[in-house]
Image: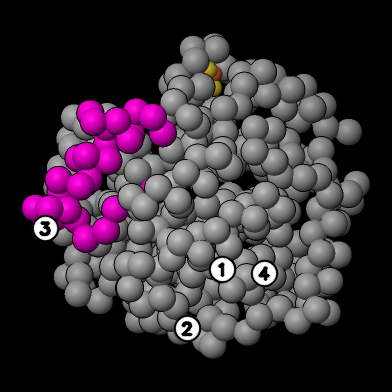
C-alpha cells in the first residue's frame, strides 16, 4: 500500500482508504469482514459520518478492537454549536470510542451553511472545544459544491483537510481548487471518485484492462490518484471483492500513462452524459430514508443510465429500475428529502421525469 502525507495533519495515510458510506447496506458481519480485510491489506484510514446511518456502530463493532491500526474520521451535518456537540457525543457512543482523529464539518456546501458553522454559535466552536479536550485530533471540512466555500475553507486557516468530489467526468472546476489546497498545506480527501458509484456498474465486455477487473473503477481511482495534489481517495466499499480489487491499485500505485488516460476517456465517453453539481444526483443517499420507501439515488442512477448510455446498454437502467420495490410515482411531495440533499436537487420533479422515462421501456 502506498501512503501519502495528509497535509498539515502530518498523518501518513493509505492512498486508498475506506469510505464507509455503503456500510448501512450490509450486515454487521459483512461490514466486519470488509473492514478487517481492508486493514489487513494496509488501509489505515476509515471515513464515516453521523449521517451514514449505522456505519459508525458497525465500525466500532467490526474493528473497534484494532483501533490503534487506523485513523478514524467522522462528520457532523449540524452547523450549529449545540447540534454538533450532541452529534459528536452520539458518534462516540455509536463507535464505542473516546477519540476521533479527524472531525469534519459535513457538506458545508453553500454560503448560509458556511456562515452558520463559522459563527460564534456554530459547529466549528464545538469541534474546537472537543479538540482542546483531547477528544478530536484535527478539525476538517467537506464541501460537495460551491467553489467559493471551498476556497474560503482552504484559505481561512481553520481546517487541516478538505474533502471534495473529484472524478474524470466532473473535474475541471475542482481541479483548480486542489492546487490551492496544496499551496495552503490542507490535506485533500477525494470522495465520489466513481461519481457516487454510477461508474461501478459491470459492463462485461468493456471491463478488461486499466489495472483491475472493472476497468472503469480502476481507471477512475487511478485517474484521481494520478493528480499529485490528491492525498487520498475513499471509495465506498461493501463487498470483499471491491476491497481486494480497489486496494490492489495502490500496491504500489502506478499513475495512468497517457495511453491509459486516453483509453479511460474513450470508455467513459461510451457511457455518455455528464455529471454536474446542481443537475445530477451525487448518489450520497443523504436524502434517505424516504417515508414512502422510494430508493431515490437508485431511481436517479437508473434514469441517468437510460438517458446517457448507448442503445445496447440502456437495458441496464431499465433492469435496475425494475428491481426496485417502490416506483418513483409513489412520491407524495412531502419535501423531507429536499432539506437533506446537498446538491439542491428538485427531487420530486426529477422523480416524475424518471418515472415517465423508466416506465416506458421499449
Ligand atoms: S418528497 Fe417524495 S421522494 Fe422526497 S421524501 Fe417525500 S415522498 Fe420521498
Ligand atoms: S437526491 Fe440528493 S441527497 Fe439524494 S442521493 Fe442524490 S444528491 Fe444525494
Give the quadrant of residue 187: bottom left
**Left/right of residue 315 with respect to residue 334 in the rendered view:** right
Residue 71 place in picture, x, y as percent = 28, 68
Residue at the (51%, 64%) spot, across then down = 183
The image shows residue 35, relative to residue 102, as above or below, that is below
Q: Is mark 4 within 8 Å of ligand 2?
A: no
- How far is mark 3 from mark 2, CA to CA? 29 Å
Residue 112 place in picture, x, y as percent = 44, 26
User: Within 10 angstroms of label 4, few (less than 14), some, or many (20 or more) residues?
Assistant: many
Mark 1 sits on what residue?
229
Marks 3 & 4, CB-CB < 8 Å contact: no
Is tag 3's residue or tag 2's residue first in the polypeptide sequence? Answer: 2
Q: Nearer the viewer, mark 1 or mark 4?
A: 1
Camera-side residue: 253 or 310?
Answer: 253
Q: Nearer the viewer, mark 3 or mark 4?
A: 3
The region drawn magenta spans: 114-141
Where disc 3 sits, the SS reads: loop
The answer to whether any part of residue 273 appears in the image is yes
Residue at the (33%, 35%) spot, across then down = 118
Where disc 2 sits, the SS reads: loop
Camera-side residue: 164 or 328?
Answer: 164
- Is 125 in the magenta? yes
**Left/right of residue 325 with respect to residue 170 in the rendered view:** left
Amino acid at each position: 500500500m502506498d501512503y501519502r502525507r495528509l497535509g498539515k495533519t502530518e498523518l501518513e495515510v493509505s492512498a486508498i482508504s475506506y469510505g464507509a458510506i455503503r456500510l448501512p447496506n450490509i450486515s454487521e458481519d459483512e461490514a466486519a469482514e470488509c473492514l478487517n480485510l481492508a486493514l489487513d491489506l494496509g488501509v489505515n484510514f476509515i471515513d464515516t459520518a453521523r449521517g451514514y446511518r449505522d456505519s459508525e456502530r458497525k465500525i466500532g463493532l467490526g474493528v473497534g478492537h484494532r483501533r490503534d491500526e487506523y485513523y478514524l474520521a467522522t462528520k457532523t451535518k449540524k452547523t450549529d454549536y449545540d447540534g454538533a456537540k450532541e452529534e459528536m457525543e452520539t458518534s462516540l457512543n455509536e463507535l464505542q470510542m473516546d477519540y476521533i482523529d479527524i472531525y469534519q464539518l459535513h457538506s458545508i456546501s453553500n454560503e448560509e451553511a458556511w456562515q452558520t458553522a463559522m459563527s460564534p454559535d456554530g459547529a466549528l466552536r464545538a469541534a474546537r472545544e472537543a479538540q482542546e479536550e483531547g477528544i478530536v485530533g484535527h478539525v476538517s471540512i467537506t464541501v460537495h459544491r460551491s467553489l467559493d466555500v471551498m476556497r474560503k475553507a482552504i484559505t481561512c486557516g481553520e481546517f487541516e483537510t478538505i474533502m471534495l468530489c473529484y472524478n474524470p467526468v466532473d473535474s475541471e472546476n475542482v481541479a483548480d481548487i486542489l492546487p490551492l489546497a496544496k499551496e495552503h498545506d490542507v490535506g485533500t480527501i477525494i470522495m465520489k471518485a466513481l461519481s457516487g458509484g454510477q461508474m461501478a456498474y459491470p459492463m462485461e465486455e468493456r471491463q478488461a484492462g486499466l489495472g483491475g477487473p472493472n476497468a472503469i473503477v480502476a481507471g477512475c481511482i487511478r485517474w484521481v490518484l494520478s493528480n499529485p495534489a490528491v492525498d487520498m481517495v475513499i471509495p465506498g466499499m461493501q463487498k470483499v471483492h471491491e476491497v481486494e480489487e480497489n486496494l490492489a491499485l495502490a500496491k504500489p500505485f502506478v499513475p495512468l500513462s497517457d495511453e491509459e488516460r486516453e483509453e479511460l476517456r474513450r470508455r467513459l465517453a461510451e457511457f455518455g452524459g455528464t455529471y454536474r453539481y446542481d443537475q445530477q444526483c451525487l448518489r450520497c443517499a443523504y436524502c434517505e430514508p424516504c417515508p414512502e420507501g422510494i430508493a431515490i439515488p437508485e431511481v436517479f442512477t437508473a434514469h441517468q443510465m437510460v438517458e446517457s448510455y448507448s442503445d445496447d446498454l440502456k437495458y441496464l437502467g431499465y433492469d435496475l429500475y425494475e428491481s426496485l420495490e417502490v416506483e418513483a410515482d409513489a412520491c407524495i411531495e412531502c419535501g423531507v428529502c429536499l432539506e437533506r440533499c446537498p446538491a439542491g436537487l428538485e427531487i420530486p420533479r426529477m422523480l416524475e421525469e424518471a418515472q415517465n422515462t423508466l416506465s416506458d421501456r421499449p
